[in-house]
Structures are given as C-alpha cells and as structure tokens.
Image: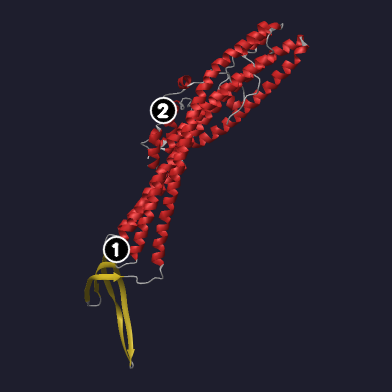
Amino acid sequence: MRHLLPTALPLAALCLAASLAANHAKAQGRCGNDETTVELLISRGAAVDSVAMPSNDNIQARSLGDPQNQLQQIAREALSRSAQMRSSGLAAEAADLDVEEASAASRPQVSVGASLMAVGSRLSQSGLTEEDGGHAQSQLSLNATGPIYDGGRRSGLTQYRRELAGAADLNTASLRERVVLDAITYALERNRLRLQIQVYQQYVRKMSCLTAALEQIVAQDRGRASELVQARKNQRQAEISRDGAITTVRQIDARLRKIVGENVMPWSGIGVPLASLPDFGEILRQIDNSNDVRQLVAQAQAYDVYSKAVAAGGGPQLNWVFGGAAGKGNETTSRSWQAGVTLNWTLYNGGGTTAAANAASKRAEAIRQQLDEVLNDRKAQAAQLREAAVSAFDRAKTTAEVLRDSDRVRNYTLEQWSQLGRRSLFDVMGAEAEHYNLRVAYINALYDGFSACAQLRSLGSGLAEWLVPAVR
C-alpha cells in the first residue's frame, strides 16, 4: 500500500521561526525527540519519532542478524507451520504407496485356504433309514498365480502410478515455494509500511511543532491566521496518512503471524539480499526446469503411459496357476493338485477399451498444450519482473540523488523566509512537502525492487531452494 503525503510539509527547523514569538523556548520544547517506538505506535496508534532516510546500508545496520539468515528464518517458520504443506506431504506419501500397490500386481499372488467342519447325514429309502451320526472333516488348500504375458499392462499401470507420485512430489515443492513467497512478500510489505509510518510520524511531529509555534505568532499577529489554518490542515492530513499505514500494517502483521506464528521479528534487513538482480538468462533456463513445469510434464507422461496400459489390457492376458489341496474326513484322506496356464482375451467390449485409451491420450495432449502456455506466461512474467526491478532500483537511485538536492532547497527556502523575508511560509511548506513525498517515493521504489526480485527468483529454481534447500 502506498500513501501520498499532503502537498505541504514544514521542516523541523521552521520552529526556529517561533523566535519571532514571545514564548519561543516553550514552543521549542514541544518539538523535542519522541522516543515512542514503532511497536508501541502500532499497538496503540500513537506517534513514533522520525528516522533517517533508509538506504541499503542503514537497513542492514538496523537488522537483527545476517539478512540472509533472516530470510531463511522466515522461510523455515512458514514451512514448519503450514497445514497445506503437511497435507501435501501426506498426499505424496499416499501416492508412493499407490506405486507399491500397482507394483505388487506384477508379482506372484499366493493364497492359503483352510476349513474344519462337522458333517452328518440321514438317508431314508424303501422304509429303510441310514444315518451317519456325524464326523469331523478338514481341508487345506494352496493356490498361486502369476503373470506370464500381459502386453505391458501391469508394468504400464505401475509406471503410471510412479509418474503420478513424482507429480505429487513436485506439487509439494510448488506449494512450498508459494508458502515461502507469501511469507517473504508479507514481510517485505510490513517493512515498507513501517518505514512509511516513521516518515509520516516525522511529518506529524514537525507539523505539530509548527502549529504550536504559529498559535503563538497568531496570538500577536492575526494577519497570519491563514498560515495556522494551513498548518492544522496539513497536520490532520498527515495523521490520516499515518493512521492509514498503521491500520494496514496491523492487518499485514495478522497475516504474517498466521503464516510464521507469533514469533514475528523486525526482520528489517531482509531486503538486502534481494537488492541484487539474479542473472536473467539463468532464470529463463531454470523456468524450463521449475517445479510447476516438471509437474505438468510428469502428469502428461503419466497419461501417455496409462493410455498404453489400457490398450494392452485389451490384448491377451496369459498367467500361470498352481493349486493343491488336502482333506481328511471319516476314515478317508484325499490329496489333489493342479498346474497350468490360463488365457484371457477380450475380443469385444463395445469399444470401451479403445475409448479409455484415447481419453488418456487426449488428457496428455491437453496438459502439453497447457504446458506451452505456462512456459510462455512464466517467461513473459520473468521479463516483466526484471524490467520492474531494474526500473524500481533506478527510480530509487534517482530519487536518492534528488533527495539531496531537495534537502538543500528546503534549507535555502527556510533561510530566505526566516531571515530575508523573500519567501512565504507556504513556499517553505511546499518545499518540505516535496522532500517528504520523495522520501516515501524512495521507500516505495526500493521495496518495489525487492518484491520484484523475490518474485523473479520464485519463477526460476525458487526462493525455497535458494534459502532452505535442505527442507523437502
């Protein structure tokens, strides 16, 4: 979220002009440093003291720990807390078990059967009755079967499951990347807003100081009441901008805590590793081998294999069989066995096999069409992000240079107003407004560049692979 400052903003040094009033010392005392921290500001909506213009150097100086370690901490916390990651991991494990199930169908199947029964009978014929009071009868059987030839149906189904398992693993990797990117994006936006809040609060402090000084001046010179009205208006506008940023950063904090937990650190240095653009040619090569692309390739291959397996299922299926049985009854014992081969061949099933095979082939082709579009979109997006990052960092560099000139201009304008009377207070406020707008523009440009670099890395091998390659 970006906020634009009002069109007028006084310099703290303007409070020196209150020396024209009777109670200068009292007014100056109101302009002392405010020790309120950003955390307290966000928690209660109060004011926070201003800070120096952010740069790569002082961002790193204010960070807690190495910036790369901060990024890694965010990634690890997000991955460890993600319910989606746990769900995807279980789905991948289930897909691996499906492979084992399909593979087992190609191995011999052995079964054992047993029975124990009490048998009795009663036979009546021509007035004669023959009765068997009952006896025990037991039987034990062993059966085994295995494939000899199936045209590749079983191996095809196993490979189909294997490809789907690989796609499930790649889906987990893609999800891991999205989780890490979301966490880092929120952390970057949080830092952007916190810096904006500091700039807005400096505006509020200086406007409050100027308003207090002008109140004393107007008490002696009613002709300057319009300046006081303008100062009060700008102070309220500054407070609105600050409060809007505070509201937004609270929302970002809530989302970030949902992702990484309650242990949300300042992480103020995370932009430093993202200040360098990755090699664009390498990113394009990585896109061809990215998780999303490989997942689509695996799915297409799975349907190709499945189509062949279904077609093979319509051909001859040759299996070997073996069976043996032994039984014992009333003073009798029996044993038997059998061995041979069985042949099953579906000659006609209404075209169902052909339709199923063609459907799988169509699904594979549809995924390949989708793959081409995904590759083109990701490469176009990479080019756009690279251009956005280069433009943002160039804009930040140019803005920083203009800021130095703006600082001199506002000092000259103040001097001409307070000492020589050649400028109006509105000129001074306009110069200050320009300077603070440039400060916000610098922050936005810098973090636009950081965000674009993060997204650009995500399109290639991924932020997760860059930060926490050991996490799988």
Indicate the position of residue 296 as horizontal and vertical percent values. 41, 48
Question: In the image, residue 184 lies at what x, y percent?
Answer: 47, 33
Task: Say whether residue 176 is visible.
Answer: yes
State the residue in front, 214 or 123.
214
Q: Which image quadrant is residue 274 in?
A: top left
- Picture quadrant of residue 331: bottom left
The quarter in which the N terminus is drawn is top right
Query: Is 261 placed left or right of 2 in the picture?
Result: left
Looking at the picture, does residue 446 appear above or below residue 407?
below
Badge 2 marks a residue whose secondary structure is helix
Do the residues under discs 2 and 1 have CB atoms within 8 angstroms? Answer: no
- Identified at 60% across, 13% down, the residue is 409
Percent across and percent down for residue 279 are: 39, 32
Image mark for residue 16:
none
Amino acid on which the number 2 mark rests in the picture: Gln
Residue 429 against residue 447 in the figure, above or below: above
Q: Residue at x 76, y 9 (%)?
A: 220
Circle 1 residues within 10 Å: few <14, some 14–19, many ≥20 = some
Taking the image as shown, residue 27 lies to the left or right of residue 461, namely right
Which residue is the site of mark 2?
Answer: 68
Residue corresponding to mark 1 = 151
Mark 1 lies on a secondary structure that is loop
Identify which residue, 337 or 415, lies in the foreground: 415
Q: Is residue 32 visible?
A: no
Provide residue 223's location: percent of width, then percent of height.
Answer: 77, 12
